[in-house]
Image (cartoon, helix red, strand yellow):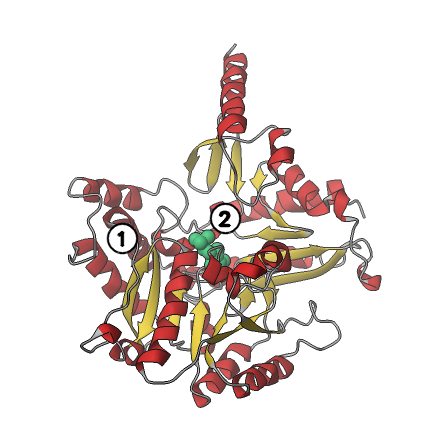
Amino acid sequence: MKCEKSTTRHERFATLDRSYLWHPFTAMRRWSRSDPIIIESGEGFELIDDHGRRYIDGFSSLWCNLHGHRVRQIDNAISEQLGKIAHSTLLGLASIPSIELARRLVQVAPAGLTRVFFSDSGATAVEVALKLAFQYFHNTGRKARRFIALKEGYHGDTIGAVSVGGVETFHALFKPLLFETTFVDCPNSFYHPAGGGSAPVVLSQVEAAIDAGDCCAVIIEPLIQAAGGMLTHPTGFLSALRKLTRDRGVLLIADEVATGFCRTGSMFACDRENVCPDIMCLGKGLTGGYLPVAATLASEELYGAFYRDGPAGTFFHGHTFTGNALGCAAAVASMDLIESSGLVASLDAKCALLEQRLARLANHPNIADIRRCGLMVGIDFMMDPAARAPFDPSLRIGEQICRRATDMGLMIRPLDDIVVLMPAPAMDLDTMTRMMDILEAAIHDQLPR
Ligand SMILES: *Cc1c(COP(=O)(O)O)cnc(C)c1O
Protein backbone atom coordinates (compact mmCIF):
# COMPACT_ATOMS: atom_id res chain seq x y z
CA MET A 1 0.00 0.00 0.00
CA LYS A 2 2.69 2.41 1.10
CA CYS A 3 4.79 1.41 -1.88
CA GLU A 4 1.95 2.04 -4.29
CA LYS A 5 1.42 5.47 -2.80
CA SER A 6 5.09 6.35 -3.23
CA THR A 7 4.95 5.14 -6.83
CA THR A 8 1.99 7.37 -7.65
CA ARG A 9 3.65 10.30 -5.96
CA HIS A 10 6.87 9.60 -7.84
CA GLU A 11 4.99 9.45 -11.14
CA ARG A 12 3.33 12.78 -10.41
CA PHE A 13 6.67 14.51 -9.76
CA ALA A 14 8.37 12.76 -12.67
CA THR A 15 5.65 14.00 -15.02
CA LEU A 16 5.98 17.53 -13.67
CA ASP A 17 9.76 17.38 -14.10
CA ARG A 18 9.33 16.34 -17.72
CA SER A 19 6.78 19.12 -18.22
CA TYR A 20 8.66 22.02 -16.69
CA LEU A 21 12.38 21.45 -16.19
CA TRP A 22 15.36 21.89 -18.44
CA HIS A 23 18.30 20.05 -16.88
CA PRO A 24 21.92 21.22 -17.25
CA PHE A 25 24.30 19.27 -19.49
CA THR A 26 21.41 16.95 -20.33
CA ALA A 27 20.00 15.64 -23.61
CA MET A 28 16.40 16.39 -22.73
CA ARG A 29 14.85 14.09 -25.34
CA ARG A 30 16.63 11.12 -23.81
CA TRP A 31 15.95 12.39 -20.29
CA SER A 32 12.23 12.72 -20.90
CA ARG A 33 12.06 9.05 -21.84
CA SER A 34 13.82 7.90 -18.69
CA ASP A 35 12.56 7.52 -15.16
CA PRO A 36 14.32 10.20 -13.11
CA ILE A 37 15.71 9.58 -9.66
CA ILE A 38 14.12 12.28 -7.51
CA ILE A 39 16.12 13.21 -4.43
CA GLU A 40 14.07 14.24 -1.47
CA SER A 41 16.52 14.36 1.42
CA GLY A 42 20.01 13.55 2.54
CA GLU A 43 21.69 12.25 5.64
CA GLY A 44 25.41 12.09 6.24
CA PHE A 45 27.04 10.73 3.11
CA GLU A 46 23.80 9.40 1.65
CA LEU A 47 21.18 10.81 -0.69
CA ILE A 48 17.60 9.60 -0.18
CA ASP A 49 15.08 9.48 -3.03
CA ASP A 50 11.30 9.83 -2.98
CA HIS A 51 10.90 6.06 -2.55
CA GLY A 52 13.15 6.18 0.52
CA ARG A 53 16.01 4.46 -1.30
CA ARG A 54 19.48 5.45 -0.13
CA TYR A 55 22.54 6.10 -2.26
CA ILE A 56 26.08 6.80 -1.12
CA ASP A 57 26.94 10.25 -2.50
CA GLY A 58 30.04 9.13 -4.41
CA PHE A 59 30.37 12.37 -6.37
CA SER A 60 29.92 14.83 -3.50
CA SER A 61 26.73 16.11 -5.17
CA LEU A 62 28.75 17.20 -8.17
CA TRP A 63 32.04 17.86 -6.38
CA CYS A 64 30.87 20.34 -3.78
CA ASN A 65 29.84 18.50 -0.62
CA LEU A 66 32.58 18.32 2.05
CA HIS A 67 31.17 17.17 5.38
CA GLY A 68 28.07 15.24 4.32
CA HIS A 69 24.44 16.32 4.21
CA ARG A 70 22.42 17.83 7.07
CA VAL A 71 25.49 18.56 9.14
CA ARG A 72 24.34 19.96 12.46
CA GLN A 73 26.96 22.70 12.73
CA ILE A 74 26.30 24.09 9.24
CA ASP A 75 22.51 23.73 9.55
CA ASN A 76 22.63 25.65 12.83
CA ALA A 77 24.87 28.39 11.44
CA ILE A 78 22.39 28.99 8.61
CA SER A 79 19.41 29.00 11.00
CA GLU A 80 21.18 31.45 13.29
CA GLN A 81 22.01 33.74 10.41
CA LEU A 82 18.42 33.46 9.20
CA GLY A 83 17.39 34.84 12.59
CA LYS A 84 19.39 37.97 11.77
CA ILE A 85 19.18 38.58 8.01
CA ALA A 86 19.30 36.39 4.89
CA HIS A 87 20.91 38.87 2.55
CA SER A 88 22.15 42.41 2.27
CA THR A 89 24.30 43.88 -0.48
CA LEU A 90 28.06 44.50 -0.45
CA LEU A 91 27.62 47.48 -2.80
CA GLY A 92 28.15 50.40 -0.47
CA LEU A 93 27.54 48.31 2.66
CA ALA A 94 29.54 45.83 4.70
CA SER A 95 28.17 42.72 6.39
CA ILE A 96 29.41 40.63 9.30
CA PRO A 97 29.36 37.13 7.72
CA SER A 98 31.26 38.32 4.62
CA ILE A 99 33.89 40.02 6.80
CA GLU A 100 34.37 36.89 8.89
CA LEU A 101 34.59 34.64 5.86
CA ALA A 102 37.07 36.87 4.03
CA ARG A 103 39.37 36.89 7.07
CA ARG A 104 39.14 33.09 7.36
CA LEU A 105 39.90 32.58 3.69
CA VAL A 106 42.98 34.80 3.80
CA GLN A 107 44.19 32.90 6.89
CA VAL A 108 44.14 29.52 5.14
CA ALA A 109 44.98 30.58 1.57
CA PRO A 110 48.56 30.47 0.27
CA ALA A 111 50.46 33.34 1.96
CA GLY A 112 50.40 36.31 -0.39
CA LEU A 113 46.72 36.19 -1.25
CA THR A 114 45.26 38.96 0.86
CA ARG A 115 42.06 40.24 -0.76
CA VAL A 116 38.73 38.49 -1.30
CA PHE A 117 36.14 39.35 -3.95
CA PHE A 118 32.89 37.41 -3.53
CA SER A 119 30.53 36.13 -6.19
CA ASP A 120 28.14 33.20 -6.46
CA SER A 121 29.46 30.41 -8.69
CA GLY A 122 32.73 28.98 -9.92
CA ALA A 123 32.13 30.52 -13.33
CA THR A 124 31.65 34.00 -11.89
CA ALA A 125 34.78 33.57 -9.74
CA VAL A 126 36.63 32.91 -13.01
CA GLU A 127 35.01 35.90 -14.78
CA VAL A 128 36.20 38.07 -11.89
CA ALA A 129 39.73 36.64 -12.17
CA LEU A 130 39.94 37.31 -15.91
CA LYS A 131 38.63 40.86 -15.67
CA LEU A 132 40.88 41.62 -12.66
CA ALA A 133 43.93 40.38 -14.58
CA PHE A 134 42.98 42.43 -17.62
CA GLN A 135 42.37 45.61 -15.63
CA TYR A 136 45.55 45.07 -13.59
CA PHE A 137 47.57 45.30 -16.79
CA HIS A 138 45.59 48.32 -17.93
CA ASN A 139 46.07 50.04 -14.56
CA THR A 140 49.82 49.41 -14.60
CA GLY A 141 50.14 50.97 -18.03
CA ARG A 142 50.76 47.83 -20.04
CA LYS A 143 48.63 46.64 -22.89
CA ALA A 144 47.89 42.95 -22.66
CA ARG A 145 44.68 41.11 -23.26
CA ARG A 146 45.55 37.52 -24.10
CA PHE A 147 45.08 34.59 -21.75
CA ILE A 148 46.93 31.31 -21.97
CA ALA A 149 44.95 28.22 -21.00
CA LEU A 150 45.28 24.45 -21.15
CA LYS A 151 43.61 22.13 -23.60
CA GLU A 152 40.95 20.06 -21.80
CA GLY A 153 40.70 22.79 -19.16
CA TYR A 154 37.29 23.65 -17.71
CA HIS A 155 36.51 26.89 -15.93
CA GLY A 156 32.72 27.19 -16.07
CA ASP A 157 30.01 27.98 -18.59
CA THR A 158 29.75 31.75 -18.81
CA ILE A 159 31.22 33.30 -21.97
CA GLY A 160 34.49 34.46 -20.41
CA ALA A 161 35.02 31.14 -18.68
CA VAL A 162 34.17 29.29 -21.90
CA SER A 163 36.69 31.48 -23.77
CA VAL A 164 39.47 29.98 -21.64
CA GLY A 165 37.86 26.50 -21.69
CA GLY A 166 39.46 23.72 -23.69
CA VAL A 167 36.88 20.92 -23.71
CA GLU A 168 35.80 20.69 -27.35
CA THR A 169 32.49 18.90 -26.69
CA PHE A 170 31.27 21.66 -24.41
CA HIS A 171 32.93 24.65 -26.04
CA ALA A 172 33.41 24.25 -29.82
CA LEU A 173 29.94 25.45 -30.83
CA PHE A 174 30.27 28.75 -28.98
CA LYS A 175 33.61 29.76 -30.55
CA PRO A 176 32.12 32.69 -32.53
CA LEU A 177 31.05 34.27 -29.24
CA LEU A 178 34.41 33.97 -27.50
CA PHE A 179 37.55 36.05 -27.12
CA GLU A 180 40.73 34.56 -28.47
CA THR A 181 42.85 32.48 -26.10
CA THR A 182 46.15 30.66 -26.66
CA PHE A 183 45.86 26.99 -25.73
CA VAL A 184 48.78 24.82 -24.73
CA ASP A 185 48.77 21.05 -24.30
CA CYS A 186 47.59 19.27 -21.21
CA PRO A 187 50.63 17.78 -19.46
CA ASN A 188 49.11 14.36 -18.87
CA SER A 189 51.08 11.45 -20.31
CA PHE A 190 48.05 9.22 -20.88
CA TYR A 191 46.13 11.93 -22.68
CA HIS A 192 49.25 12.65 -24.75
CA PRO A 193 50.78 9.24 -25.33
CA ALA A 194 53.20 10.54 -27.95
CA GLY A 195 54.99 12.56 -25.28
CA GLY A 196 53.71 15.84 -26.68
CA GLY A 197 52.18 16.68 -23.35
CA SER A 198 55.15 16.25 -21.05
CA ALA A 199 55.76 19.03 -18.55
CA PRO A 200 58.87 20.49 -20.26
CA VAL A 201 57.09 20.56 -23.64
CA VAL A 202 54.05 22.33 -22.21
CA LEU A 203 56.22 24.81 -20.30
CA SER A 204 58.05 25.68 -23.50
CA GLN A 205 54.69 26.15 -25.23
CA VAL A 206 53.70 28.58 -22.48
CA GLU A 207 56.99 30.40 -22.88
CA ALA A 208 56.51 30.70 -26.63
CA ALA A 209 52.99 32.05 -26.08
CA ILE A 210 54.35 34.67 -23.67
CA ASP A 211 57.09 35.55 -26.19
CA ALA A 212 54.40 36.18 -28.81
CA GLY A 213 53.37 39.14 -26.63
CA ASP A 214 50.09 40.61 -25.42
CA CYS A 215 49.70 38.00 -22.66
CA CYS A 216 48.32 39.00 -19.26
CA ALA A 217 47.76 35.70 -17.47
CA VAL A 218 47.93 31.93 -17.52
CA ILE A 219 44.85 30.20 -16.11
CA ILE A 220 45.11 26.65 -14.88
CA GLU A 221 43.33 24.01 -12.83
CA PRO A 222 46.21 23.12 -10.51
CA LEU A 223 47.33 19.44 -10.28
CA ILE A 224 44.26 17.94 -11.97
CA GLN A 225 41.94 19.00 -14.79
CA ALA A 226 38.68 17.68 -13.45
CA ALA A 227 35.82 18.10 -15.95
CA GLY A 228 38.24 17.52 -18.85
CA GLY A 229 38.60 13.92 -17.69
CA MET A 230 40.40 13.87 -14.32
CA LEU A 231 43.68 14.57 -16.10
CA THR A 232 46.46 14.69 -13.53
CA HIS A 233 49.64 16.71 -14.02
CA PRO A 234 53.16 15.53 -13.29
CA THR A 235 54.63 16.62 -9.94
CA GLY A 236 56.52 19.87 -10.28
CA PHE A 237 54.57 21.20 -13.25
CA LEU A 238 52.61 23.71 -11.18
CA SER A 239 55.66 25.08 -9.35
CA ALA A 240 57.62 25.30 -12.62
CA LEU A 241 54.73 27.20 -14.21
CA ARG A 242 54.67 29.54 -11.20
CA LYS A 243 58.38 30.24 -11.60
CA LEU A 244 58.04 30.79 -15.35
CA THR A 245 55.08 33.19 -15.06
CA ARG A 246 56.75 35.13 -12.24
CA ASP A 247 60.02 35.44 -14.17
CA ARG A 248 58.16 36.63 -17.24
CA GLY A 249 55.85 39.10 -15.48
CA VAL A 250 52.64 37.29 -16.36
CA LEU A 251 49.91 36.56 -13.80
CA LEU A 252 49.06 33.03 -12.71
CA ILE A 253 45.38 32.32 -12.06
CA ALA A 254 44.76 29.09 -10.13
CA ASP A 255 41.20 27.86 -10.61
CA GLU A 256 40.72 25.84 -7.42
CA VAL A 257 36.94 25.68 -7.76
CA ALA A 258 37.10 21.86 -7.92
CA THR A 259 40.39 21.20 -6.13
CA GLY A 260 39.97 23.56 -3.17
CA PHE A 261 38.96 22.57 0.37
CA CYS A 262 40.65 19.20 0.89
CA ARG A 263 39.90 17.43 -2.40
CA THR A 264 43.51 16.88 -3.39
CA GLY A 265 44.70 15.69 0.00
CA SER A 266 45.60 19.13 1.32
CA MET A 267 43.61 22.31 1.89
CA PHE A 268 44.38 23.62 -1.61
CA ALA A 269 46.10 22.03 -4.59
CA CYS A 270 48.57 24.93 -4.64
CA ASP A 271 49.73 23.92 -1.12
CA ARG A 272 51.09 20.66 -2.48
CA GLU A 273 53.72 22.49 -4.48
CA ASN A 274 54.10 25.49 -2.18
CA VAL A 275 52.74 27.76 -4.87
CA CYS A 276 51.10 31.12 -4.36
CA PRO A 277 49.22 32.18 -7.48
CA ASP A 278 48.42 35.86 -8.14
CA ILE A 279 44.72 35.07 -8.26
CA MET A 280 42.84 32.06 -6.91
CA CYS A 281 39.24 31.06 -7.71
CA LEU A 282 37.17 29.20 -5.13
CA GLY A 283 33.65 27.81 -5.31
CA LYS A 284 32.02 24.38 -5.01
CA GLY A 285 33.24 23.25 -1.55
CA LEU A 286 33.51 26.77 -0.10
CA THR A 287 30.21 26.48 1.81
CA GLY A 288 30.67 22.77 2.47
CA GLY A 289 28.57 22.35 -0.67
CA TYR A 290 25.51 23.97 0.91
CA LEU A 291 24.94 27.28 -0.86
CA PRO A 292 26.16 29.13 -3.96
CA VAL A 293 29.06 31.26 -2.77
CA ALA A 294 32.31 31.72 -4.67
CA ALA A 295 35.39 33.84 -4.10
CA THR A 296 38.27 35.25 -6.09
CA LEU A 297 41.37 35.89 -4.00
CA ALA A 298 44.02 38.35 -5.16
CA SER A 299 47.50 39.34 -4.10
CA GLU A 300 48.17 42.64 -2.36
CA GLU A 301 50.20 43.78 -5.37
CA LEU A 302 47.24 43.28 -7.67
CA TYR A 303 44.94 45.03 -5.22
CA GLY A 304 47.46 47.85 -4.96
CA ALA A 305 47.08 48.61 -8.66
CA PHE A 306 43.40 49.39 -8.00
CA TYR A 307 44.07 51.38 -4.83
CA ARG A 308 43.94 54.86 -6.34
CA ASP A 309 41.65 57.70 -7.38
CA GLY A 310 39.92 57.90 -10.75
CA PRO A 311 38.16 55.24 -12.81
CA ALA A 312 41.11 52.82 -12.58
CA GLY A 313 40.46 52.68 -8.83
CA THR A 314 37.16 50.86 -9.22
CA PHE A 315 36.63 47.30 -10.37
CA PHE A 316 33.35 47.63 -12.22
CA HIS A 317 32.01 44.19 -11.49
CA GLY A 318 29.52 42.76 -9.01
CA HIS A 319 26.61 40.41 -8.59
CA THR A 320 23.34 40.96 -6.77
CA PHE A 321 24.05 38.18 -4.31
CA THR A 322 27.75 38.94 -3.85
CA GLY A 323 28.67 38.02 -0.27
CA ASN A 324 25.25 36.55 0.56
CA ALA A 325 24.91 36.35 4.35
CA LEU A 326 23.42 32.85 4.60
CA GLY A 327 26.09 31.49 2.25
CA CYS A 328 28.93 33.20 4.08
CA ALA A 329 27.63 31.92 7.44
CA ALA A 330 27.54 28.39 6.02
CA ALA A 331 31.08 28.82 4.68
CA VAL A 332 32.42 30.04 8.02
CA ALA A 333 30.77 27.03 9.74
CA SER A 334 32.30 24.72 7.13
CA MET A 335 35.75 26.19 7.74
CA ASP A 336 35.27 25.79 11.51
CA LEU A 337 34.42 22.14 10.87
CA ILE A 338 37.45 21.59 8.66
CA GLU A 339 39.55 22.78 11.59
CA SER A 340 37.71 21.19 14.51
CA SER A 341 37.40 17.79 12.83
CA GLY A 342 41.07 17.76 11.82
CA LEU A 343 39.93 17.12 8.25
CA VAL A 344 43.22 17.85 6.49
CA ALA A 345 45.13 15.46 8.76
CA SER A 346 42.53 12.72 8.16
CA LEU A 347 42.98 12.71 4.39
CA ASP A 348 46.10 10.53 4.13
CA ALA A 349 44.30 7.46 5.47
CA LYS A 350 41.43 8.00 3.03
CA CYS A 351 43.77 8.43 0.08
CA ALA A 352 45.59 5.24 1.13
CA LEU A 353 42.31 3.32 1.20
CA LEU A 354 41.37 4.57 -2.26
CA GLU A 355 44.82 3.72 -3.58
CA GLN A 356 44.66 0.20 -2.20
CA ARG A 357 41.16 -0.43 -3.56
CA LEU A 358 41.92 1.07 -6.97
CA ALA A 359 45.00 -1.15 -7.26
CA ARG A 360 42.64 -4.15 -7.32
CA LEU A 361 41.13 -2.80 -10.54
CA ALA A 362 44.42 -2.02 -12.23
CA ASN A 363 44.65 -5.15 -14.36
CA HIS A 364 41.03 -5.23 -15.47
CA PRO A 365 41.23 -5.79 -19.26
CA ASN A 366 39.04 -2.76 -20.06
CA ILE A 367 40.66 -0.27 -17.72
CA ALA A 368 43.16 1.82 -19.63
CA ASP A 369 44.22 4.21 -16.90
CA ILE A 370 43.40 5.04 -13.29
CA ARG A 371 44.15 8.62 -12.29
CA ARG A 372 43.93 9.90 -8.75
CA CYS A 373 44.81 13.16 -7.09
CA GLY A 374 43.86 13.01 -3.42
CA LEU A 375 40.17 12.11 -3.33
CA MET A 376 39.56 12.91 -7.01
CA VAL A 377 39.55 9.78 -9.15
CA GLY A 378 39.03 9.01 -12.83
CA ILE A 379 38.90 5.45 -14.17
CA ASP A 380 39.33 5.38 -17.93
CA PHE A 381 37.58 2.51 -19.72
CA MET A 382 38.46 1.30 -23.22
CA MET A 383 37.51 -1.65 -25.37
CA ASP A 384 41.17 -2.50 -25.97
CA PRO A 385 43.55 -0.40 -23.89
CA ALA A 386 46.68 -1.85 -25.54
CA ALA A 387 45.46 -0.76 -28.97
CA ARG A 388 44.05 2.48 -27.49
CA ALA A 389 40.70 1.49 -28.96
CA PRO A 390 37.77 3.15 -27.14
CA PHE A 391 34.35 1.58 -26.79
CA ASP A 392 31.73 2.45 -29.38
CA PRO A 393 30.27 5.66 -27.84
CA SER A 394 26.73 4.38 -28.50
CA LEU A 395 27.38 1.66 -25.91
CA ARG A 396 27.64 4.39 -23.24
CA ILE A 397 29.87 2.17 -21.14
CA GLY A 398 30.63 4.86 -18.53
CA GLU A 399 26.95 5.56 -18.09
CA GLN A 400 26.11 1.85 -17.90
CA ILE A 401 28.62 1.27 -15.12
CA CYS A 402 27.39 4.29 -13.16
CA ARG A 403 23.77 3.25 -13.64
CA ARG A 404 24.54 -0.23 -12.34
CA ALA A 405 26.31 1.34 -9.34
CA THR A 406 23.28 3.55 -8.71
CA ASP A 407 21.00 0.49 -8.75
CA MET A 408 23.25 -0.97 -6.08
CA GLY A 409 23.17 2.19 -3.94
CA LEU A 410 26.10 4.32 -5.09
CA MET A 411 25.48 7.64 -6.86
CA ILE A 412 28.24 8.48 -9.35
CA ARG A 413 28.39 10.19 -12.75
CA PRO A 414 30.78 9.52 -15.63
CA LEU A 415 32.58 11.83 -18.03
CA ASP A 416 32.02 9.82 -21.21
CA ASP A 417 33.80 6.50 -20.55
CA ILE A 418 35.68 7.84 -17.56
CA VAL A 419 34.04 6.80 -14.31
CA VAL A 420 34.56 9.56 -11.77
CA LEU A 421 34.70 9.07 -8.03
CA MET A 422 34.80 12.03 -5.71
CA PRO A 423 33.86 11.13 -2.15
CA ALA A 424 33.41 13.94 0.35
CA PRO A 425 36.68 14.57 2.22
CA ALA A 426 34.89 13.89 5.53
CA MET A 427 33.53 10.51 4.38
CA ASP A 428 34.40 7.81 6.92
CA LEU A 429 36.50 4.78 5.95
CA ASP A 430 33.58 2.34 6.32
CA THR A 431 31.37 4.24 3.89
CA MET A 432 34.33 4.62 1.55
CA THR A 433 34.88 0.87 1.69
CA ARG A 434 31.20 0.25 0.87
CA MET A 435 31.52 2.72 -2.00
CA MET A 436 34.47 0.80 -3.44
CA ASP A 437 32.71 -2.56 -2.96
CA ILE A 438 29.75 -1.35 -5.00
CA LEU A 439 31.91 0.23 -7.67
CA GLU A 440 33.91 -2.96 -8.07
CA ALA A 441 30.73 -5.05 -8.32
CA ALA A 442 29.20 -2.66 -10.86
CA ILE A 443 32.29 -2.79 -13.05
CA HIS A 444 32.41 -6.58 -12.93
CA ASP A 445 28.69 -6.82 -13.71
CA GLN A 446 28.97 -4.61 -16.78
CA LEU A 447 32.39 -5.75 -17.93
CA PRO A 448 33.15 -9.27 -16.70
CA ARG A 449 36.81 -10.11 -16.99
C1 LIG B 1 32.85 23.38 -11.63
C2 LIG B 1 34.00 24.22 -12.03
C3 LIG B 1 33.83 25.57 -12.38
C4 LIG B 1 32.48 26.20 -12.51
O1 LIG B 1 31.81 26.30 -11.31
P1 LIG B 1 30.22 26.60 -11.32
O2 LIG B 1 29.88 26.81 -9.90
O3 LIG B 1 29.59 25.37 -11.90
O4 LIG B 1 29.99 27.78 -12.17
C5 LIG B 1 34.95 26.31 -12.65
N1 LIG B 1 36.18 25.78 -12.58
C6 LIG B 1 36.38 24.49 -12.25
C7 LIG B 1 37.77 23.97 -12.18
C8 LIG B 1 35.31 23.66 -11.98
O5 LIG B 1 35.49 22.36 -11.69
Q: Residue at x 19, y 49 (%)?
A: 88
> What label does residue 62 carry, if any?
2
Compared across the picture, whether 354 is left or right of 91 comes to right
Q: Would you say residue 399 is visible in this rendering?
A: yes
Count neighbours of disc 1 (C-alpha within 10 A) and say few if under 14, some if 14 to 19, many if 20 or more.
Answer: many
Q: Amino acid at mark 2?
A: Leu
Give the vertical position of 49 relative to 223 (above or below).
above
Residue at the (75%, 41%) spot, across then down: 446
Identify the image quadrant of residue 183: bottom right
The image shows a total of numbered marks equal to 2
Tell me what residue is drawn at x 49 percent, y 86 percent: 244
Up-down relation of residue 319 to residue 306 (above or below): above
Percent coordinates x, y for residue 425 in the rendering = 45, 55
Instruction: Kindly state the secondary structure of the residue where label 2 is placed.
Output: helix
- 376 or 101: nearer the viewer: 101
Q: Marks 2 and 1: CB-CB under 8 Å?
A: no
State the residue position of label 1.
328
> For the residue with label 2, is its CB less than 8 Å from the closest atom of ligand 1?
yes
Q: CA distance from mark 2 to mark 1?
A: 20 Å
Residue at image coords 70%, 77%: 196
- Residue lying at the far front in this picture: please name it: 176
Q: Nearer the viewer, residue 20 or 277?
A: 20
Q: Toward the viewer: 318 or 251?
A: 318
Asked if residue 263 can be seen in this view, the reply is no
Residue 136: where, in percent of width, then height? 34, 77
- Tell me: is circle 1 under 8 Å from ligand 1: no
Give residue 75's quadrant in the image. Answer: top left
- Residue 270 is left or right of residue 72, and the answer is right
Q: For residue 135, which quarter of the picture? A: bottom left
Q: Position of residue 254 (x, y in %)?
A: 44, 70
Asked which secondary structure carries label 1, the reply is: helix
